[in-house]
Image: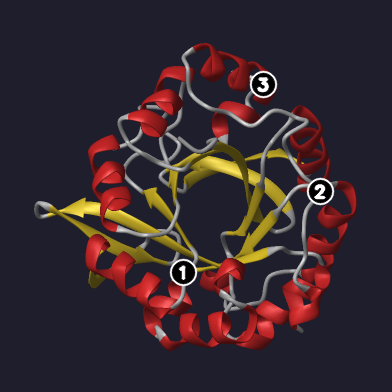
Amino acid sequence: MLAKRIIPCLDIKDGVTVKGINFEGLRNVGDPVELAARYAAEGADELVCLDISATIEGRKTFATLVERIAEVIDIPFTVGGGIASVEDAGRLLLAGADKVSVNSAAVRRPELIDEIASRYGSQFIVAAIDAKRMGGKWVVTTHSGSRPTDRELFSWAGETVDRGAGEILFTSMDNDGTGSGYPCETYAALSEMLPVPVIASGGAGSVEDIAEVLTSGHADAALAASIFHYGRIGIGELKAALAAKGIPIRTMTDNTIKSRYHDSI
């Protein structure tokens, strides 16, 4: 079994890190640059930074904030929010991102995935999928989960990979911020179906939750926010607990300095 990744997530709104439940009741939980530096120092394998209001407000992700975060970390860094073109992706790459995450814009115009993958390679693009259980199936949503679409999780995930996405980041909007655990059966089904890594997001409340999604859920990585932001457990402590359960986890010495794709520009 390949080593599993632990990925803190910074949800950014108006330049600060926020967190709520199901993307509602958002609270300021800290400065994104300070949190990024802290999580990298604690042993995070990667970092995800999502500008959660960029699509709703119709603006672009702030490249200047990406630059500031990139300056203080030495781990792979994924950025998402408001990315609607190859030019948007390139701007973030120049600012210091290692990967970009596309969501609402790709649902609206799936060719965006083909275009970014063709320009920079599949390793550069993460398909972020937010979905809710509705009528007995997982319905893909956009705009931070506020707008249901006519797409279904599994078919859409398969299409994004066919178009060139190198990873899938699936967030259960029903579980996000609740600390109630991940929907592991769904992650297991996705992982079995797809030939690319699956990152689990939405619901981490304990070591047991993360251990379960990495084992019975077959996720390649666990993304979490509240559990780290509110100090319920540190990343080093989490990794030690997972290793004690026999789950292969990267150590500080295993993590390599981030590799950028500047040569692709």
Tell me if residue 147 can be seen: no
What residue does disc 3 label?
234
Which of marks 3 and 1 precedes in the sequence? 1
Residue occupying the point 56% across, 27% down: 227
Which of marks 1 and 2 precedes in the sequence? 1
What residue does disc 1 label?
103
| Pick the front one: 219 or 18 | 219
Q: Is residue 61 above or below residue 154?
A: below
Give the CA distance from mark 2 to mark 1. Answer: 27 Å
Which of marks 2 and 3 precedes in the sequence? 3
Residue at disc 1, secondary structure? loop
What residue does disc 2 label?
257
Q: In which quarter of the image is residue 50?
A: bottom right
Tell me if residue 75 can be seen: yes
Name the amino acid, label 1: Asn
Q: Residue 213 carries which label?
A: none
Q: Quadrant of residue 201?
A: top left
Q: Position of residue 129 (x, y in %)?
A: 39, 61
Residue occupying the point 9% across, 51% down: 136
Residue occupying the point 43% across, 24% down: 211
Name the amino acid, label 2: Ile
Q: How many marks?
A: 3
Residue at disc 3, secondary structure? loop
Q: Position of residue 105 (x, y in %)?
A: 47, 78
